[in-house]
Amino acid sequence: MAPRVAIIGAGFGGLCMAIQLERAGIRSYTVFEKAGDLGGTWRDNSYPGAGCDIPSHLYSYSFEKYASWTRRYPGQPEILGYLEHCADKYDVRRKIRFGTEVTRATFDGSRWHVTTGSDAPEEEAGSVADRAEVFDVVVMSVGQLNRPRLPDIPGMTDFAGVSFHSARWNHDHDLTGRRVAVIGNGSSAAQFIPEVAQQAGHLTVFQRTPNWVIPKPDATFGPLARLAFRFVPGLQRAYREWIYRYAEGTLYPALAQGWSAGLLRKRALAHLDAQVPDPELRARLTPDYPPGCKRVVIDSAFYPALTRQNVEVVTDGIAEITPKGVRTAEGLHEVDTIIYATGFLSTEFLSPIEVEGRDGRSLAEQWSGGAEAYLGISVPNFPNLFLLYGPNTNLGHNSIVFMLECQVRHVMSCLPYLARGPLEVRPEAMAAWSRQLDAAMSRMVWGDGCQSWYKTAAGRVTNNWPGPTTLYRRLTARPPRPAYRRV
Protein backbone atom coordinates (compact mmCIF):
# COMPACT_ATOMS: atom_id res chain seq x y z
CA MET A 1 0.00 0.00 0.00
CA ALA A 2 1.38 3.40 -0.96
CA PRO A 3 2.31 5.69 1.94
CA ARG A 4 0.28 8.79 2.69
CA VAL A 5 2.59 11.75 2.13
CA ALA A 6 2.15 15.31 3.37
CA ILE A 7 4.13 17.92 1.43
CA ILE A 8 4.42 21.29 3.12
CA GLY A 9 4.91 24.10 0.60
CA ALA A 10 4.16 24.49 -3.11
CA GLY A 11 7.33 26.13 -4.38
CA PHE A 12 10.03 24.53 -6.54
CA GLY A 13 10.73 21.78 -3.99
CA GLY A 14 7.16 20.88 -3.08
CA LEU A 15 6.06 20.78 -6.70
CA CYS A 16 9.04 18.63 -7.64
CA MET A 17 8.15 16.15 -4.88
CA ALA A 18 4.50 16.05 -5.96
CA ILE A 19 5.40 15.57 -9.62
CA GLN A 20 7.77 12.68 -8.88
CA LEU A 21 5.14 10.97 -6.73
CA GLU A 22 2.67 11.34 -9.63
CA ARG A 23 5.19 9.94 -12.09
CA ALA A 24 5.75 6.96 -9.77
CA GLY A 25 2.02 6.31 -9.58
CA ILE A 26 1.81 7.36 -5.91
CA ARG A 27 -1.23 9.61 -5.58
CA SER A 28 -1.83 9.31 -1.84
CA TYR A 29 -0.28 12.71 -1.14
CA THR A 30 -1.48 16.18 -0.18
CA VAL A 31 0.35 19.47 -0.70
CA PHE A 32 -0.34 22.09 1.97
CA GLU A 33 0.21 25.68 0.88
CA LYS A 34 -0.47 28.56 3.26
CA ALA A 35 -0.82 31.11 0.46
CA GLY A 36 -3.55 31.35 -2.12
CA ASP A 37 -1.37 30.24 -5.03
CA LEU A 38 1.72 28.17 -5.80
CA GLY A 39 5.24 29.44 -6.45
CA GLY A 40 6.87 29.96 -3.05
CA THR A 41 9.50 32.67 -3.17
CA TRP A 42 8.64 33.40 -6.82
CA ARG A 43 5.09 34.16 -5.79
CA ASP A 44 6.09 36.32 -2.81
CA ASN A 45 8.90 38.36 -4.37
CA SER A 46 7.08 40.41 -6.96
CA TYR A 47 9.06 43.63 -6.51
CA PRO A 48 10.00 45.61 -9.64
CA GLY A 49 12.94 44.00 -11.40
CA ALA A 50 12.64 40.69 -9.51
CA GLY A 51 14.49 37.92 -11.30
CA CYS A 52 16.99 35.10 -11.01
CA ASP A 53 20.78 35.23 -11.18
CA ILE A 54 21.00 31.66 -12.49
CA PRO A 55 20.44 31.16 -16.26
CA SER A 56 16.90 30.04 -17.06
CA HIS A 57 17.77 26.80 -18.83
CA LEU A 58 19.52 25.60 -15.66
CA TYR A 59 17.04 27.13 -13.21
CA SER A 60 14.43 24.57 -14.21
CA TYR A 61 13.68 20.88 -13.72
CA SER A 62 15.84 18.43 -15.66
CA PHE A 63 12.72 16.39 -16.48
CA GLU A 64 10.81 19.43 -17.77
CA LYS A 65 13.12 21.32 -20.07
CA TYR A 66 11.48 24.49 -21.26
CA ALA A 67 12.14 25.97 -24.69
CA SER A 68 9.96 29.03 -24.13
CA TRP A 69 12.34 31.06 -21.95
CA THR A 70 12.64 34.55 -23.42
CA ARG A 71 15.77 35.62 -21.52
CA ARG A 72 19.03 34.09 -20.34
CA TYR A 73 18.22 35.33 -16.83
CA PRO A 74 14.48 35.02 -16.27
CA GLY A 75 12.29 37.53 -14.51
CA GLN A 76 9.89 36.66 -11.69
CA PRO A 77 6.75 36.49 -13.85
CA GLU A 78 8.41 34.05 -16.26
CA ILE A 79 9.67 31.77 -13.47
CA LEU A 80 6.25 31.76 -11.81
CA GLY A 81 4.71 30.97 -15.19
CA TYR A 82 7.09 28.02 -15.57
CA LEU A 83 6.02 26.60 -12.20
CA GLU A 84 2.36 27.01 -13.12
CA HIS A 85 3.07 25.25 -16.42
CA CYS A 86 4.68 22.32 -14.57
CA ALA A 87 1.83 22.06 -12.05
CA ASP A 88 -0.72 21.94 -14.85
CA LYS A 89 1.20 19.61 -17.15
CA TYR A 90 1.71 17.01 -14.42
CA ASP A 91 -1.76 17.60 -12.96
CA VAL A 92 -0.66 18.22 -9.38
CA ARG A 93 -2.60 21.42 -8.79
CA ARG A 94 -5.65 19.33 -7.84
CA LYS A 95 -3.68 17.95 -4.87
CA ILE A 96 -2.74 21.34 -3.42
CA ARG A 97 -4.74 22.78 -0.55
CA PHE A 98 -4.30 26.50 -0.86
CA GLY A 99 -4.83 28.85 2.06
CA THR A 100 -3.98 26.05 4.48
CA GLU A 101 -1.13 26.68 6.90
CA VAL A 102 0.54 23.83 8.76
CA THR A 103 1.13 24.82 12.37
CA ARG A 104 2.29 21.55 13.92
CA ALA A 105 3.54 18.08 13.00
CA THR A 106 3.69 15.37 15.69
CA PHE A 107 5.00 11.80 15.42
CA ASP A 108 3.02 9.27 17.50
CA GLY A 109 5.45 6.37 17.17
CA SER A 110 4.25 5.15 13.80
CA ARG A 111 2.65 8.03 11.92
CA TRP A 112 2.61 11.81 11.69
CA HIS A 113 -0.26 14.02 12.78
CA VAL A 114 -0.24 17.20 10.73
CA THR A 115 -2.21 20.09 12.21
CA THR A 116 -3.47 22.91 10.04
CA GLY A 117 -4.95 26.17 11.20
CA SER A 118 -6.41 29.43 9.98
CA ASP A 119 -7.35 32.82 11.29
CA ALA A 120 -10.48 31.43 12.93
CA PRO A 121 -11.38 32.72 16.42
CA GLU A 122 -9.63 31.01 19.29
CA GLU A 123 -12.87 29.47 20.62
CA GLU A 124 -13.19 27.53 17.36
CA ALA A 125 -9.89 25.68 17.89
CA GLY A 126 -10.40 22.00 17.16
CA SER A 127 -13.00 22.73 14.49
CA VAL A 128 -12.47 22.46 10.76
CA ALA A 129 -10.32 25.59 11.05
CA ASP A 130 -7.82 23.80 13.29
CA ARG A 131 -7.56 20.07 12.63
CA ALA A 132 -5.04 17.25 12.45
CA GLU A 133 -4.70 14.64 9.71
CA VAL A 134 -2.63 11.48 9.74
CA PHE A 135 0.20 10.76 7.29
CA ASP A 136 2.97 8.19 7.03
CA VAL A 137 5.52 10.65 5.66
CA VAL A 138 6.04 14.40 5.99
CA VAL A 139 8.15 16.29 3.44
CA MET A 140 8.96 19.83 4.54
CA SER A 141 9.50 22.15 1.58
CA VAL A 142 9.10 25.56 3.16
CA GLY A 143 12.38 26.98 1.83
CA GLN A 144 15.09 29.03 3.50
CA LEU A 145 14.01 32.45 2.24
CA ASN A 146 10.30 32.59 2.97
CA ARG A 147 9.95 34.67 6.16
CA PRO A 148 10.96 38.34 5.77
CA ARG A 149 13.38 39.69 8.34
CA LEU A 150 12.84 43.22 9.62
CA PRO A 151 15.71 45.05 11.34
CA ASP A 152 15.67 45.97 15.01
CA ILE A 153 15.75 49.75 14.67
CA PRO A 154 14.18 52.00 17.32
CA GLY A 155 11.13 53.92 16.18
CA MET A 156 10.09 51.76 13.23
CA THR A 157 6.44 51.78 14.29
CA ASP A 158 6.51 55.58 14.66
CA PHE A 159 7.14 56.24 10.98
CA ALA A 160 4.28 58.33 9.57
CA GLY A 161 4.81 57.32 5.94
CA VAL A 162 4.44 54.02 4.09
CA SER A 163 6.86 51.18 4.81
CA PHE A 164 7.08 47.58 3.64
CA HIS A 165 9.53 44.70 3.12
CA SER A 166 10.69 43.99 -0.43
CA ALA A 167 9.18 40.48 -0.24
CA ARG A 168 5.80 42.02 0.60
CA TRP A 169 5.87 44.77 -2.00
CA ASN A 170 3.09 47.33 -1.78
CA HIS A 171 2.03 47.60 -5.41
CA ASP A 172 -0.76 50.03 -4.52
CA HIS A 173 1.79 52.62 -3.35
CA ASP A 174 2.93 54.80 -6.25
CA LEU A 175 6.59 55.80 -5.85
CA THR A 176 6.51 58.47 -8.52
CA GLY A 177 8.16 61.64 -7.23
CA ARG A 178 8.43 60.37 -3.68
CA ARG A 179 11.31 60.56 -1.23
CA VAL A 180 12.21 56.92 -0.75
CA ALA A 181 14.61 55.22 1.66
CA VAL A 182 15.93 51.72 0.99
CA ILE A 183 17.47 50.00 4.00
CA GLY A 184 19.69 47.19 2.77
CA ASN A 185 21.64 46.58 -0.44
CA GLY A 186 21.76 42.85 -1.10
CA SER A 187 20.61 40.90 -4.16
CA SER A 188 16.95 41.96 -3.96
CA ALA A 189 17.83 45.62 -3.44
CA ALA A 190 20.25 45.51 -6.36
CA GLN A 191 17.36 44.41 -8.58
CA PHE A 192 14.70 46.88 -7.50
CA ILE A 193 16.84 49.97 -6.79
CA PRO A 194 17.34 50.74 -10.51
CA GLU A 195 13.56 50.55 -10.99
CA VAL A 196 12.78 52.69 -7.96
CA ALA A 197 15.45 55.25 -8.86
CA GLN A 198 13.67 55.95 -12.14
CA GLN A 199 10.39 56.70 -10.35
CA ALA A 200 11.38 58.37 -7.10
CA GLY A 201 11.99 62.07 -6.72
CA HIS A 202 14.87 61.22 -4.41
CA LEU A 203 16.20 57.84 -3.30
CA THR A 204 18.42 57.31 -0.25
CA VAL A 205 20.13 53.92 -0.01
CA PHE A 206 21.30 53.04 3.49
CA GLN A 207 24.23 50.65 3.15
CA ARG A 208 25.64 48.80 6.11
CA THR A 209 28.15 46.64 4.22
CA PRO A 210 29.01 46.89 0.50
CA ASN A 211 28.62 43.85 -1.71
CA TRP A 212 30.82 42.41 -4.39
CA VAL A 213 29.04 42.91 -7.69
CA ILE A 214 29.79 41.32 -11.06
CA PRO A 215 28.03 42.06 -14.37
CA LYS A 216 25.04 40.05 -15.50
CA PRO A 217 25.55 38.97 -19.14
CA ASP A 218 21.84 38.92 -19.94
CA ALA A 219 20.44 38.32 -23.40
CA THR A 220 17.09 37.70 -25.03
CA PHE A 221 16.07 34.52 -26.82
CA GLY A 222 14.18 35.48 -29.94
CA PRO A 223 11.70 33.30 -31.85
CA LEU A 224 14.43 31.55 -33.87
CA ALA A 225 16.47 30.69 -30.78
CA ARG A 226 13.39 29.34 -29.02
CA LEU A 227 12.51 27.26 -32.06
CA ALA A 228 16.06 25.88 -32.13
CA PHE A 229 15.90 24.96 -28.44
CA ARG A 230 12.59 23.21 -29.09
CA PHE A 231 13.37 21.29 -32.26
CA VAL A 232 17.15 20.86 -32.67
CA PRO A 233 17.98 17.52 -31.02
CA GLY A 234 20.24 17.84 -27.99
CA LEU A 235 20.70 21.62 -28.25
CA GLN A 236 18.91 22.54 -25.04
CA ARG A 237 20.54 19.68 -23.14
CA ALA A 238 24.01 20.72 -24.35
CA TYR A 239 23.40 24.38 -23.46
CA ARG A 240 22.18 23.43 -19.99
CA GLU A 241 25.18 21.19 -19.46
CA TRP A 242 27.56 23.95 -20.55
CA ILE A 243 26.07 26.39 -18.01
CA TYR A 244 26.28 23.76 -15.29
CA ARG A 245 29.91 22.85 -16.02
CA TYR A 246 30.95 26.50 -16.12
CA ALA A 247 29.41 27.12 -12.69
CA GLU A 248 31.09 24.05 -11.23
CA GLY A 249 34.45 24.59 -12.89
CA THR A 250 34.81 28.36 -12.45
CA LEU A 251 32.49 29.75 -9.80
CA TYR A 252 32.77 26.97 -7.21
CA PRO A 253 36.60 27.14 -7.00
CA ALA A 254 36.29 30.87 -6.17
CA LEU A 255 34.14 30.04 -3.13
CA ALA A 256 36.56 27.29 -2.15
CA GLN A 257 39.39 29.86 -2.28
CA GLY A 258 40.87 28.10 -5.29
CA TRP A 259 42.31 29.18 -8.62
CA SER A 260 39.44 31.46 -9.67
CA ALA A 261 39.15 33.49 -6.44
CA GLY A 262 41.51 36.17 -7.73
CA LEU A 263 39.75 36.17 -11.08
CA LEU A 264 36.38 36.84 -9.41
CA ARG A 265 37.87 39.71 -7.42
CA LYS A 266 39.45 41.30 -10.50
CA ARG A 267 36.21 41.01 -12.43
CA ALA A 268 34.22 42.65 -9.65
CA LEU A 269 36.71 45.50 -9.21
CA ALA A 270 36.83 46.11 -12.96
CA HIS A 271 33.05 46.25 -13.02
CA LEU A 272 33.05 48.76 -10.17
CA ASP A 273 35.73 50.93 -11.83
CA ALA A 274 33.89 50.92 -15.16
CA GLN A 275 30.49 51.86 -13.74
CA VAL A 276 31.29 54.21 -10.84
CA PRO A 277 33.56 57.10 -11.92
CA ASP A 278 33.36 58.99 -8.60
CA PRO A 279 36.36 57.80 -6.50
CA GLU A 280 34.67 58.68 -3.17
CA LEU A 281 31.54 56.69 -3.99
CA ARG A 282 33.66 53.90 -5.42
CA ALA A 283 35.56 53.65 -2.13
CA ARG A 284 32.30 53.34 -0.19
CA LEU A 285 31.14 50.58 -2.51
CA THR A 286 34.36 48.55 -2.22
CA PRO A 287 34.07 45.60 0.23
CA ASP A 288 36.82 44.81 2.73
CA TYR A 289 36.19 41.05 2.77
CA PRO A 290 36.86 38.34 0.16
CA PRO A 291 34.40 37.86 -2.70
CA GLY A 292 31.90 35.12 -1.88
CA CYS A 293 32.02 35.61 1.88
CA LYS A 294 28.58 37.16 1.40
CA ARG A 295 26.44 36.32 -1.60
CA VAL A 296 27.90 37.92 -4.73
CA VAL A 297 25.46 40.24 -6.48
CA ILE A 298 25.11 39.63 -10.22
CA ASP A 299 23.69 42.75 -11.79
CA SER A 300 24.63 45.31 -14.44
CA ALA A 301 22.14 48.06 -13.57
CA PHE A 302 22.79 48.45 -9.83
CA TYR A 303 25.93 50.64 -9.92
CA PRO A 304 24.61 53.01 -12.61
CA ALA A 305 21.50 53.56 -10.48
CA LEU A 306 23.66 54.58 -7.51
CA THR A 307 25.40 57.23 -9.62
CA ARG A 308 22.16 59.02 -10.58
CA GLN A 309 21.73 62.59 -9.38
CA ASN A 310 18.57 61.73 -7.45
CA VAL A 311 20.25 58.86 -5.56
CA GLU A 312 22.34 59.13 -2.39
CA VAL A 313 24.29 56.31 -0.73
CA VAL A 314 24.51 56.66 3.05
CA THR A 315 26.94 54.51 5.02
CA ASP A 316 26.42 56.08 8.46
CA GLY A 317 24.82 53.76 10.97
CA ILE A 318 21.09 54.22 11.49
CA ALA A 319 20.30 55.53 14.99
CA GLU A 320 16.51 55.50 14.77
CA ILE A 321 13.48 55.92 12.58
CA THR A 322 11.31 58.93 13.34
CA PRO A 323 7.84 59.87 12.06
CA LYS A 324 9.57 61.93 9.35
CA GLY A 325 12.33 59.61 8.25
CA VAL A 326 15.63 57.92 9.08
CA ARG A 327 18.10 59.46 11.52
CA THR A 328 21.82 58.72 11.45
CA ALA A 329 24.68 60.28 13.40
CA GLU A 330 24.90 62.91 10.65
CA GLY A 331 21.26 63.97 10.95
CA LEU A 332 17.73 63.23 9.76
CA HIS A 333 16.97 62.04 6.24
CA GLU A 334 13.35 63.00 5.61
CA VAL A 335 11.44 60.46 3.52
CA ASP A 336 7.84 59.44 2.96
CA THR A 337 8.49 55.79 2.04
CA ILE A 338 10.78 53.16 3.57
CA ILE A 339 11.53 49.88 1.79
CA TYR A 340 13.24 47.23 3.92
CA ALA A 341 15.57 45.05 1.84
CA THR A 342 16.81 43.28 4.94
CA GLY A 343 16.57 39.66 3.89
CA PHE A 344 14.92 36.72 5.57
CA LEU A 345 14.99 34.65 8.74
CA SER A 346 17.14 32.19 6.83
CA THR A 347 18.62 30.18 9.72
CA GLU A 348 15.26 29.53 11.43
CA PHE A 349 14.49 26.43 9.40
CA LEU A 350 10.83 25.26 9.42
CA SER A 351 9.84 27.98 11.91
CA PRO A 352 7.14 28.71 13.03
CA ILE A 353 5.92 25.12 12.48
CA GLU A 354 6.20 23.11 15.71
CA VAL A 355 7.71 19.70 14.98
CA GLU A 356 7.67 16.95 17.61
CA GLY A 357 9.42 13.68 16.83
CA ARG A 358 9.99 10.35 18.51
CA ASP A 359 9.53 10.28 22.31
CA GLY A 360 8.19 13.84 22.26
CA ARG A 361 11.45 15.43 21.09
CA SER A 362 11.19 19.02 19.91
CA LEU A 363 13.00 19.82 16.68
CA ALA A 364 13.43 23.44 17.79
CA GLU A 365 15.22 22.28 20.94
CA GLN A 366 17.35 19.75 19.05
CA TRP A 367 18.38 22.55 16.69
CA SER A 368 18.98 25.14 19.41
CA GLY A 369 22.68 25.30 18.46
CA GLY A 370 21.93 25.55 14.74
CA ALA A 371 20.00 23.43 12.26
CA GLU A 372 21.61 20.28 10.88
CA ALA A 373 20.37 17.31 8.92
CA TYR A 374 21.95 14.29 7.25
CA LEU A 375 22.42 15.26 3.58
CA GLY A 376 20.34 18.30 4.56
CA ILE A 377 17.35 15.93 4.35
CA SER A 378 16.92 13.73 7.45
CA VAL A 379 17.15 14.34 11.20
CA PRO A 380 17.77 11.73 13.96
CA ASN A 381 14.75 11.17 16.22
CA PHE A 382 12.35 12.32 13.51
CA PRO A 383 11.36 9.22 11.51
CA ASN A 384 9.79 9.55 8.07
CA LEU A 385 10.43 13.31 8.10
CA PHE A 386 12.32 14.67 5.10
CA LEU A 387 13.48 18.19 4.32
CA LEU A 388 13.86 19.82 0.92
CA TYR A 389 16.25 22.79 0.77
CA GLY A 390 17.22 21.93 4.33
CA PRO A 391 20.35 22.86 6.30
CA ASN A 392 23.59 23.18 4.31
CA THR A 393 22.02 22.69 0.89
CA ASN A 394 21.96 26.29 -0.36
CA LEU A 395 24.34 27.21 -3.18
CA GLY A 396 26.34 30.30 -3.97
CA HIS A 397 27.34 29.25 -7.46
CA ASN A 398 24.81 26.95 -9.11
CA SER A 399 21.12 26.10 -9.37
CA ILE A 400 19.20 25.15 -6.24
CA VAL A 401 16.79 23.29 -8.52
CA PHE A 402 19.58 20.77 -9.15
CA MET A 403 19.93 20.23 -5.39
CA LEU A 404 16.18 19.88 -4.94
CA GLU A 405 16.02 17.18 -7.58
CA CYS A 406 18.82 15.28 -5.81
CA GLN A 407 16.89 15.54 -2.54
CA VAL A 408 13.60 14.41 -4.06
CA ARG A 409 15.31 11.39 -5.66
CA HIS A 410 16.74 10.50 -2.25
CA VAL A 411 13.32 10.74 -0.59
CA MET A 412 11.80 8.60 -3.35
CA SER A 413 14.49 5.96 -2.76
CA CYS A 414 13.53 5.83 0.92
CA LEU A 415 9.80 5.27 0.37
CA PRO A 416 9.98 1.52 -0.50
CA TYR A 417 11.70 0.86 2.84
CA LEU A 418 8.79 2.29 4.80
CA ALA A 419 6.52 -0.68 4.17
CA ARG A 420 8.05 -2.46 7.18
CA GLY A 421 7.99 0.51 9.52
CA PRO A 422 9.23 4.06 10.08
CA LEU A 423 12.77 4.94 9.02
CA GLU A 424 15.14 7.44 10.60
CA VAL A 425 18.76 8.39 10.08
CA ARG A 426 21.21 6.89 12.57
CA PRO A 427 22.81 9.27 15.09
CA GLU A 428 26.26 7.99 14.16
CA ALA A 429 25.58 8.73 10.47
CA MET A 430 24.50 12.23 11.45
CA ALA A 431 27.64 12.72 13.56
CA ALA A 432 29.88 11.56 10.72
CA TRP A 433 28.07 13.87 8.33
CA SER A 434 28.57 16.83 10.68
CA ARG A 435 32.31 16.12 10.92
CA GLN A 436 32.60 15.96 7.14
CA LEU A 437 30.69 19.24 6.78
CA ASP A 438 32.91 20.97 9.32
CA ALA A 439 36.06 19.81 7.54
CA ALA A 440 34.76 20.95 4.16
CA MET A 441 33.45 24.24 5.56
CA SER A 442 36.90 25.17 6.86
CA ARG A 443 38.10 25.48 3.26
CA MET A 444 35.31 27.82 2.14
CA VAL A 445 35.37 31.59 1.99
CA TRP A 446 32.16 32.07 4.03
CA GLY A 447 33.95 32.12 7.36
CA ASP A 448 36.37 34.92 6.43
CA GLY A 449 35.28 37.82 8.59
CA CYS A 450 31.90 38.81 7.25
CA GLN A 451 28.34 38.50 8.42
CA SER A 452 25.78 37.01 6.05
CA TRP A 453 22.44 35.24 5.98
CA TYR A 454 24.40 31.99 5.65
CA LYS A 455 25.29 32.11 9.36
CA THR A 456 23.61 31.89 12.74
CA ALA A 457 24.16 34.68 15.28
CA ALA A 458 26.94 32.54 16.74
CA GLY A 459 28.73 32.45 13.38
CA ARG A 460 27.96 28.89 12.34
CA VAL A 461 27.23 28.37 8.64
CA THR A 462 23.97 26.42 8.53
CA ASN A 463 22.76 27.27 5.03
CA ASN A 464 25.43 26.57 2.43
CA TRP A 465 26.71 23.39 0.84
CA PRO A 466 30.53 23.43 0.96
CA GLY A 467 31.25 21.03 -1.88
CA PRO A 468 30.70 20.67 -5.61
CA THR A 469 27.17 19.70 -6.62
CA THR A 470 28.52 16.63 -8.40
CA LEU A 471 29.55 15.31 -4.97
CA TYR A 472 26.12 16.03 -3.52
CA ARG A 473 24.49 14.14 -6.38
CA ARG A 474 26.65 11.09 -5.66
CA LEU A 475 26.01 11.22 -1.92
CA THR A 476 22.25 11.53 -2.24
CA ALA A 477 22.17 8.68 -4.78
CA ARG A 478 23.38 6.18 -2.19
CA PRO A 479 20.83 3.62 -0.92
CA PRO A 480 19.21 4.55 2.43
CA ARG A 481 20.92 1.65 4.17
CA PRO A 482 23.16 1.67 6.24
CA ALA A 483 22.71 5.36 7.15
CA TYR A 484 19.09 4.75 8.16
CA ARG A 485 17.47 2.40 10.67
CA ARG A 486 13.96 1.22 11.50
CA VAL A 487 12.31 2.41 14.70
Image: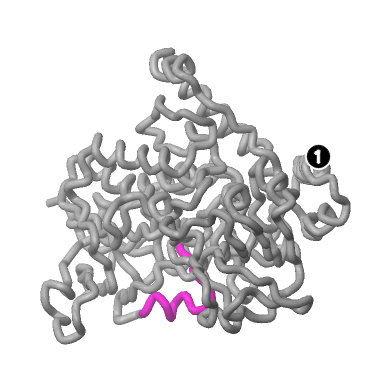
**Residue 161: x percent and y percent?**
52, 72
Q: Is 369 placed left or right of 363 in the picture? A: right
Q: Is 81 included in the stretch rendered in magenta? A: no
Q: Is 342 placed left or right of 95 in the picture? A: right
Q: Residue at x 52, y 43 (%)?
A: 52
**Residue 249: x percent and y percent?**
65, 36
In the picture shown, does residue 398 fall above or below 462?
Answer: above
Which residue is under mark 1?
Answer: 274
Q: Is 240 placed left or right of 94 in the picture? A: right
Q: Which residues are magenta?
A: 362-373
Q: Report whether residue 264 is seen.
A: yes
Q: How is the image coloured?
A: one colour
| Secondary structure of the residue carrying numbered label 1 | helix
Q: Residue furthest right?
A: 279
**Residue 347: x percent and y percent?**
51, 68
Amino acid beneath label 1: Ala
In the picture shown, does residue 82 fall above or below 338?
Answer: above
Q: Camera-side residue: 199 or 83?
A: 199
Q: Residue at x 41, y 42 (%)?
A: 77
Q: Report whether residue 259 is seen.
A: no
Binning the other alpha carbons within 10 Å of mark 1 as few (below 14), some (14 to 19) or many (20 upward) gives: few
Q: Quadrant of the C terminus?
A: bottom left
Residue 214, picture quadrant: top right
**Residue 292: x percent and y percent?**
69, 52
The chief SS type of the magenta part is: loop
Q: Is 405 placed left or right of 247 in the picture? A: left
